[in-house]
Amino acid sequence: NAGVTQTPKFQVLKTGQSMTLQCAQDMNHNSMYWYRQDPGMGLRLIYYSASEGTTDKGEVPNGYNVSRLNKREFSLRLESAAPSQTSVYFCASSELDRSTDEQYFGPGTRLTVT
Amino acid sequence: GEDVEQSLFLSVREGDSSVINCTYTDSSSTYLYWYKQEPGAGLQLLTYIFSNMDMKQDQRLTVLLNKKDKHLSLRIADTQTGDSAIYFCAETSGSARQLTFGSGTQLTVLP
């Protein structure tokens, strides 16, 4: 099992450009999450999908959209990138039926917006 | 809203014990977690504690939970250079068990 995979690993965008970050998991998990990580601020939840066909806003959703394409894939889109969106983006998945609710994380996408 | 707080940095000598502290606000959290992040990598679950427990021990790791003070700590015995990483505490909330993370504690182990 590959676990949670993310593409691309690195990306540089100019202000105003758009892009989609891809995430896939092969653990048959129901729930998927997008976080951003900024220095000294931990991880903050952008959007999540509790199950296939549903998405909900997290703590910092402005400037982002998501699509739960199927049970495996959850993408994050930046329609018009801004320098404030320079960050490391992590995707995670979880099987809520498990007692510990452990989230499994991908390796991250490092995005720089100039 | 939920808020989880940690100190940003901790340095210890190899072989000493490390104690990383965390305070949280959501008393309804079922589980509290410690995640480890090595440089350039994603987060991995290190250990967790169920909210009705006071202590959990797992090899070199000891988790203490004080529900009255909403204080969580992680003790690493015989700290090794491979333990150098960022450690995040986290609590869950909401129907999808969303995680709220602390800011992370950068542990540096000195030889």
Image (cartoon, coloured by chain):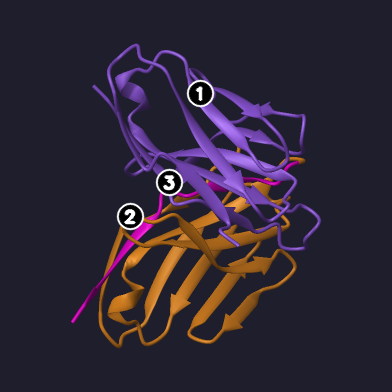
Residue nearest the observer in this picture, A66 or B15: A66
Rendered residue at 62%/60% (across/down): B32
Rendered residue at 32%/42% (across/down): A39
Q: Residue furthest right?
A: A97
Is most of the magenta stretch helix, strand or loop? strand
> Which residue is the site of mark 2?
B40
Give neighbour class at mark 1: few <14, some 14-19, many 20+ (Cα, 10 Å).
some
Residue B18, position in %: x, y? Answer: 37, 76
- Rendered orange, the chain in question is B
Q: CA distance from mark 2 to mark 1?
A: 23 Å
- SS under mark 2: loop
> Which residue is the site of mark 3?
A108
Per the rendering, the mark at residue A77 is: 1
Quarter of the image with the N terminus of chain B is top right
Indicate the quadrant where residue A73 lies: top right
Q: Which residues are magenta?
A: B96-111
Q: CA distance from mark 2 to mark 3?
A: 8 Å
- Is residue A60 at all visible to an observer of this figure? no
